[in-house]
Amino acid sequence: MEVFVRRANSGDAEFLAWVTLSASRSHLARGFWDLIIGAGEAGCLDYLRRLAVAEPRSLYHYESFLVAEVDGERAAALCGFEPRDGGWAIVGEAMFNVQRDLGWTEAEAAASYQRVAPVWAACMPPDAGADFVVENVATRPEYRRRGLADILLDVITRDAIRRGCSLAQITTYIGNDAARAAYEKSGFQVLDEKRCTELEKLLGVPGFVRLMRELKD
């Protein structure tokens, strides 16, 4: 098996849409992007494909992602970003532009916000001081259990060290034991859990678990 890790490019947008949607679903049938977009599979993927190339360039832009190829085929990906570069605020601007291009009405945008507002209000853990965040980790089913997530996490954290970052954060749903085990194998340690009744009502999962890793040469 020949594994090649590279920076994503605009031609990866469709694959990155799948990665983002799959990562948000984790081990669940539906995830956060299903709530935000409120569409079927094709509609969700179209939205996220557009987000991968949208301006302004958010953490979901292809430039934030690393792609692992196996024998020339896209197999896994993740993204990493520095919160000081704008983080979630820029995501909101990029999402607005995607929704405008898709022709969303004000009513559709308001309905999207109402679906996720309880989670934003009650379920987000407090800032833990990380200066680097890893998100959107996903591997195609046929390539799982080959260590691709381990390889990507090693590459992205070494890149964060080169950029001068000192503390990395990654989050998953409580109950996603496979992801948690992979992150712990890569040197992350559980910091805390954030349980949330609103998230359990919407997605059937009790909350989030956050892991941290000190970044050292």
Image: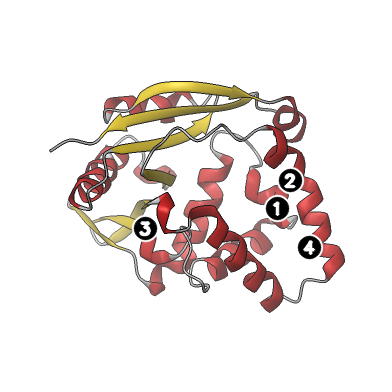
Query: Badge 2: few (under 14), some or many (20 or more) residues near its Cα, within 10 Å?
Result: some
Q: Who's the residue at 48% across and 21% down the image?
A: 192
| Residue, disc 4 | 109
Report, in whole angstroms, how far the alpha carbon at label 1 lies from the one at label 2. 6 Å
Specify the amino acid type for callout 4.
Ala
Quadrant housing residue 170:
top left
Residues under numbered marks 4 and 3 in contact, where contact means CB atoms less than 8 Å apart? no
Q: Which mark is residue 36?
A: 1
For marks 3 and 2 on the same chain, the one whose residue lies earlier in the sequence: 3
Report, in whole angstroms, how far the alpha carbon at label 2 lies from the one at label 4. 11 Å
For marks 2 and 4 on the same chain, the one whose residue lies earlier in the sequence: 4
Query: Badge 4: few (under 14), some or many (20 or more) residues near its Cα, within 10 Å?
Result: some
Specify the amino acid type for callout 2.
Val
| Residue, disc 2 | 116
Q: Which mark is residue 65?
A: 3
Percent across and percent down for residue 95 are 62, 65
For marks 3 and 1 on the same chain, the one whose residue lies earlier in the sequence: 1
Q: Under tag 4, what secondary structure?
A: helix
Residues under numbered marks 2 and 4 in contact, where contact means CB atoms less than 8 Å apart? no
Percent across and percent down for residue 184 are 33, 25
Residues under numbered marks 1 and 2 in contact, where contact means CB atoms less than 8 Å apart? yes
For residue 21, side relative to residue 178 (left or right): right
